[in-house]
Amino acid sequence: MAGEENDSKMIRRSFVFGGTGLALAGCFDTPCEEENPAQKAFLDGLRALAKPALASNNPLQVEEAANQSVALADKVGGFSGWCGTLTRIEGNAQTVAVTVDIGRQVSLYAFNDWTLAAAGSLADLFSTRSRETPPPGLSDAAIAALKTLRLGERVLLSGRMGEIAGSGVFDLSRLFGKSDAEHRQFLLAPRFVARIEAIAASKKN
């Protein structure tokens, strides 16, 4: 009887300690967007700009924070090994547009159909260093890889922030520049244009 009681106590202890270990492991599981130092620095910079501006309730501070967020993205340039979640694929192989969440409410947007992006009211919101139509926002390799991925899948990205193949495309985030409400919306959920050279499933899915 004593042996059985001891065995029972040991099982209970193992269960308690095992459960605690699992809980602690979950607490210390680093979000994938924080594993890349450059990506984490970018996201931390966006938060550092947005939080005080939104808390100030001052439209001038909100506008300045939005502009500084765009400038921060412009400084990133090329990136590699950034982690995100594939949230949207639109169009077909020729007109594809994708959205990838790279942080909490922060996303990258890349598209291949320039004529649609520049149509109508969007036309005056984009500019390039030349009058030539910019190259696609996704490389052929990235499009091929997209065919093997599913929505909601965690992916690794390489490319260039704020540009489509180096054409100096006006950042989509500047769509949010006409009112205090639009600046606030941008700070709460910024979206940036990116040229995506490579995309692949993350091994940590």
Image (tube, grey):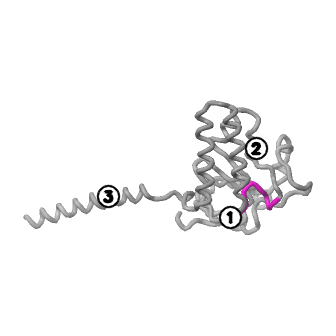
Residues at marks 1 and 2 touching, judged by CB atoms closer than 8 Å = no
Q: What is the secondary structure assignment of the residue under circle 1?
A: strand
Reading the image, the residue beneath label 1 is 158
Point out the residue furthest to the right here: 131
What residue does disc 2 label?
174
Crowd around label 1: few <14 · some 14–19 · many ≥20 (10 Å)? some
Where residue 78 sits: x, y (%)? 71, 62
Q: Distance between the residues labelled 1 and 3?
A: 38 Å
Mark-to-mark CA distance, 2 and 3: 48 Å
Q: Mark 3 points at which residue?
A: 19
Which mark is first along the chain, 3 or 2?
A: 3
Q: Does the magenta stretch include residue 161?
A: yes
Tell me if residue 42 is in the magenta stretch: no
Residues shaded magenta: 159-166
State the SS at label 3.
helix
How would you classify the magenta stretch by its main secondary structure? loop
On screen, residue 78 above or below 189: below
